[in-house]
Image: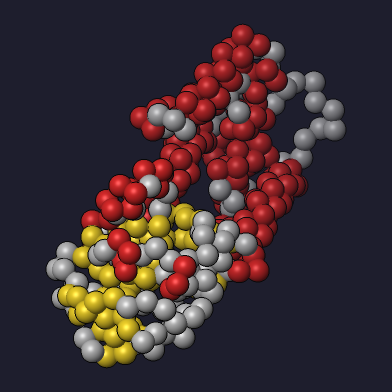
């Protein structure tokens, strides 16, 4: 009974606290008995990351602000690590001079890179093997997504191997190494999935020409929503793959994307005459134009599976009045935000 009671009352180990906070801010404070601090740090980090993501990807957010918030979130993370160690050390002070290496410090190093903890314990062969395999798989996973689950597994195995070989019996905390391993795998898999999720949800596009002046300038970088349920509306700015007529004329266009404004929906009658565009005999109010169109087109009815699109710089845009209607199957999505350069950041309503 006394031995069990002794185990339960062990003071918190500062480097176990550091390992937990390295997974996510606040976990180390909970372990050290500072629940209030733990909640505050966890909520703070979540708020910073959430605000950064909203600022970068939301139509009304400022991209530069989002990037600065990510920097603040990283600084906050490092500050929490320092506070975690200081807080646990205050409860369980260490001697000023330690003659033995701390195994949980080695586990912490292995969280940073597999093998670092083994180098710390002078296990050069094992450390080198884990470092080469872990970093190599991480680099290969960028090209071969099927390998994505392997690097987090190597990180977790490096931590566990060091724990089994170097943590003494009086320092062992089975629950702690389990949390570290599961947390490493879960968090790193989540982080690895983020680029794929972004790629599936948002397309990035850059404006190569002046065909959309004054709305879009050459060099503007856009976020394009790739919602599969999206149906274009009048006035939407859409990004699309080059139609067959464009590819027949310019085969090199296959490598890029085009961007225009939706003027006619399926079934509507479009006509361009006297510097005005009329849809179903109603003249459009187009305050976004650089100048009125100097050509005539139509009237024609937009097919059921297509759209009529024009550039805002009407007289210097190769669009539907040149190559015909845009098939809905060629549409990538709606451009909803200029995210760069900083002075041009704005929503595209």
**Viewer-proximal residue among 340 and 260:** 260
Tell me where residue 340 appears, x and y as whole percent.
Answer: 59, 61
As drawn, is 303 to the left or to the right of 35? left
Specify the quadrant of the image occupied by residue 307: bottom left
Tell me where residue 90 appears, x and y as whole percent.
Answer: 75, 47
**Viewer-proximal residue among 310 and 100:** 310
Q: What residue lies at 52% left-to-right and 65% top-to-bottom?
A: 210
> How are the colours assigned in the image?
secondary structure
Whether residue 89 can be seen here = yes
**Viewer-proximal residue among 142 and 131:** 142
Specify the quadrant of the image occupied by residue 219: bottom right
Q: What residue lies at 62% left-to-right and 58% top-to-bottom?
A: 67
Tell me where residue 226 appears, x and y as whole percent.
Answer: 34, 58
Q: Please state, as top left, top right, bottom left or bottom right, where the C terminus lies in the image.
A: bottom left
Whether residue 33 can be seen here = no
As drawn, is 27 to the left or to the right of 245? right
Q: Is residue 62 above or below residue 294?
A: above
Q: Is residue 167 above or below residue 249?
A: above
Q: Is residue 142 above or below residue 27?
A: above
Q: What residue lies at 21% left-to-right and 86% top-to-bottom?
A: 280
As drawn, is 330 to the left or to the right of 201? left
Tell me where residue 78 appears, x and y as whole percent.
Answer: 69, 48
């Amino acid at each position: 009974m006394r031995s069990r009671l002794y185990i339960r009352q062990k003071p918190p180990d500062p480097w176990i606290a550091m390992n937990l906070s390295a997974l996510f801010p606040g976990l180390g404070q909970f372990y050290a008995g500072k629940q209030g601090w733990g909640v505050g740090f966890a909520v703070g980090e979540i708020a910073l990351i959430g605000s950064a993501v909203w600022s970068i990807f939301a139509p009304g957010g400022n991209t530069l602000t989002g990037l600065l918030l990510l920097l603040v979130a990283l600084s906050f993370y490092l500050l929490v690590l320092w506070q975690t160690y200081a807080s646990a050390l205050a409860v369980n002070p260490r001697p000023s001079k330690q003659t033995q290496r701390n195994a949980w410090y080695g586990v912490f190093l292995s969280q940073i890179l597999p093998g670092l903890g083994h180098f710390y314990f002078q296990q050069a062969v094992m450390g080198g093997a884990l470092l080469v395999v872990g970093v190599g798989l991480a680099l290969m996973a960028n090209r071969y997504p099927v390998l994505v689950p392997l690097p987090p597994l190597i990180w977790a195995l490096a931590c566990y191997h060091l724990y089994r070989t170097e943590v003494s019996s009086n320092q062992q905390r089975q629950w702690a190494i389990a949390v570290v391993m599961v947390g490493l795998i879960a968090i790193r898999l989540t982080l690895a999935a983020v680029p794929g999720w972004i790629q599936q949800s948002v397309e990035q596009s850059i404006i190569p020409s002046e065909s959309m002046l004054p709305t879009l300038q050459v060099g503007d970088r856009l976020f394009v929503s790739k919602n599969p349920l999206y149906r274009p509306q009048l006035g939407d700015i859409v990004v699309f793959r080059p139609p067959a007529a464009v590819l027949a004329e310019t085969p090199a266009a296959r490598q890029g994307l085009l961007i225009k404004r939706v003027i006619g929906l399926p079934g509507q009658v479009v006509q361009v005459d006297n510097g005005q565009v009329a849809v179903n005999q109603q003249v459009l109010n187009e305050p976004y134009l650089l100048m009125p169109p100097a050509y005539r087109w139509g009237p024609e009815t937009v097919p059921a599976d297509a759209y009529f699109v024009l550039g805002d710089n009407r007289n210097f845009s190769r669009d539907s009045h040149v190559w015909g209607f845009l098939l809905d199957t060629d549409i990538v999505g709606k451009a909803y935000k200029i995210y760069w350069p900083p002075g041009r950041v704005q929503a595209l309503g």
